[in-house]
Image (tube, rainbow, N blue to C red):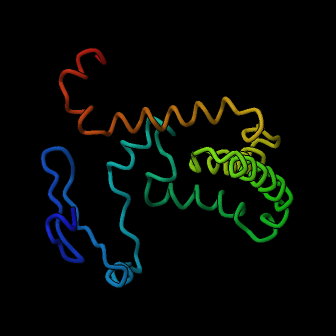
Amino acid sequence: MVRLYNLKEIFYLDLWPIGPSMVVIIDPKLMDNSTLPKPLPIHPLTAVFMKPMLGEGTMAAINGALWRKIAAAVIPAFSMSHVLGITSIMIDECLLFQERLDKSAVGGDVFSMDGLVAKLVFGIVSTVTLGESQHAQTVGSQILKDSRNLVNLARGETDPLIAYNPMVQIPRR
């Protein structure tokens, strides 16, 4: 779109009536200057997008005191001592990931890096949060499949071609 309309490093994008208007910045120097000492509130559409996947009141879609309360509970998980404690889990999952990459490279087949990386990240996160491996990289994980299905469902809910198409809405009611 930038090349097609010869747009400059900052422009206004009006998506009315299907979405909110926004200012788009594509120049890294301008992006660096646009950060504010006081963060802006989360956009209301974030909650609309996140609700089908994560429910009401998720940290990614709230502001203010509730966000600070949840952040205070989550921050210890990112401390250096905690990260060092889970290094062995990350190494084990990365070794499995390397094996999968090696097999794919030797086979010469086209494969999805997205799928492999999702299994790697899910393997680490699920082992740390649930206390046991879900074996996403070896035998597969139903929890990962269900999570991906939820994301795809939410993507369809926010796609204007689906959300505002009356022919799609009739069977959904």
Residue 75 lies in what quarter of the image?
bottom right
**Quick check: can you spot residue 139?**
yes
- Seen in the picture, residue 125 relative to 162 is either above or below; the reply is below
The residue depicted at 25 percent of the width and 22 percent of the height is 168
The residue depicted at 54 percent of the width and 36 percent of the height is 148
Residue 17 lies in what quarter of the image?
top left
Task: Count the marks.
Answer: 0
Q: Position of residue 137 (x, y in %)?
A: 73, 41
Q: Nearer the viewer, residue 116 or 155?
A: 116
**Quick check: can you spot residue 128?**
no
Q: Which of 164 and 40 is in front in this view?
A: 164
- Seen in the picture, residue 140 relative to 67 is either above or below; the reply is above
The residue depicted at 63 percent of the width and 51 percent of the height is 117
Q: With 119 as the anchor, is 40 left or right in this view?
A: left
For the C terminus, give its image quadrant. top left
Q: Position of residue 164 (x, y in %)?
A: 20, 32
Q: Where is residue 94 in the image (x, y as percent from the top left)?
A: 77, 56
The residue depicted at 63 percent of the width and 62 percent of the height is 72
- Seen in the picture, residue 133 relative to 173 is either above or below; the reply is below
Q: Position of residue 1 (x, y in %)?
A: 21, 61
Q: Nearer the viewer, residue 81 or 121?
A: 121
Residue 50 lies in what quarter of the image?
top left
Q: With 165 as the anchor, is 29 left or right in this view?
A: right
